Image (cartoon, rainbow, N blue to C red):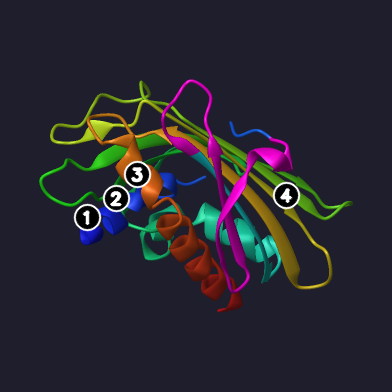
Amino acid sequence: MKRFGINISFLFFGLLISGYAFPQKDWTLVNNESWIQIYKADMANSSYKKIKVECTIDGSIDKLVRILNDVNNYKNWIYNTKTTYVLKRVNANEYYYYTETTLPWPMQNRDVVVHIKLQRDNTNHTLNITASGEPDYMPVVSGKVRVPRSTNTWQVTVPEPNKLHIIYIFEADPGGHIPSWLVNTFVNKGPYESFKKLGDTLKN
């Protein structure tokens, strides 16, 4: 059961990148390792929890944007991601991509089409990202469960040269039959592993 729970925790990060800025009092700290803080809170009209990640990492907005635009490489740093690819690029800062995330047997993998928009302010050195699942963008793939709802935001600022402060908020309904208590017990694993790898990627 422990291994199953840890694997399933990807559901709160594996569908990367609309959230909302909730008051701090709504959030409960569930992980405070190294430079990554992870919080959870109740999600409106759902038994699942929403997630917030807050961290300060080495890197630049230029490098972060390049990483996020390299959609095919998401599987190398986003927890339990099996495959990702671009479906349509509207412009340099807006695109649709497909992602599939892995669940342990006997459960089916989840997939979703994500619509992502990047808004960069070079004057104030900020980057805001909004992303939302588009479950009807393409037909359901046989053998996979389409995620019915997922939204998230990134708020990125530059507190000092070569440092990024990131606030990431994510909420989703994974669809299918997964007990919410099981997912909610392990919500910190996926976000922690993903941001840890993101930090390593930004340094390289």
CB under 8 Å between callouts 2 and 3? yes
Counting from the top left corner in percent of width and height, residue 164 is at 72, 64
**Mark 4 or 3, which is nearer the eye?**
3
Give the secondary structure at mark 4.
strand
CB under 8 Å between callouts 4 and 3? no
Q: Is residue 128 magenta?
A: no
CB under 8 Å between callouts 4 and 2? no
**Mark 1 or 4, which is nearer the eye?**
1
Name the image quarter holding the N terminus: bottom left
Residue pictured at 59% horizontal, 77% vertical: 203
Give the secondary structure at mark 3.
helix
Counting from the top left corner in percent of width and height, residue 182 is at 30, 44
Q: CA distance from mark 1 to mark 2?
A: 6 Å
Counting from the top left corner in percent of width and height, residue 44 is at 53, 24
Residue pictured at 35% horizontal, 51% vertical: 9
Q: Which residue is mark 2?
A: 8
Give the secondary structure at mark 1.
helix
Query: Tag 3 or tag 2, which sits nearer the N-term?
Result: 2
Give the secondary structure at mark 2.
helix
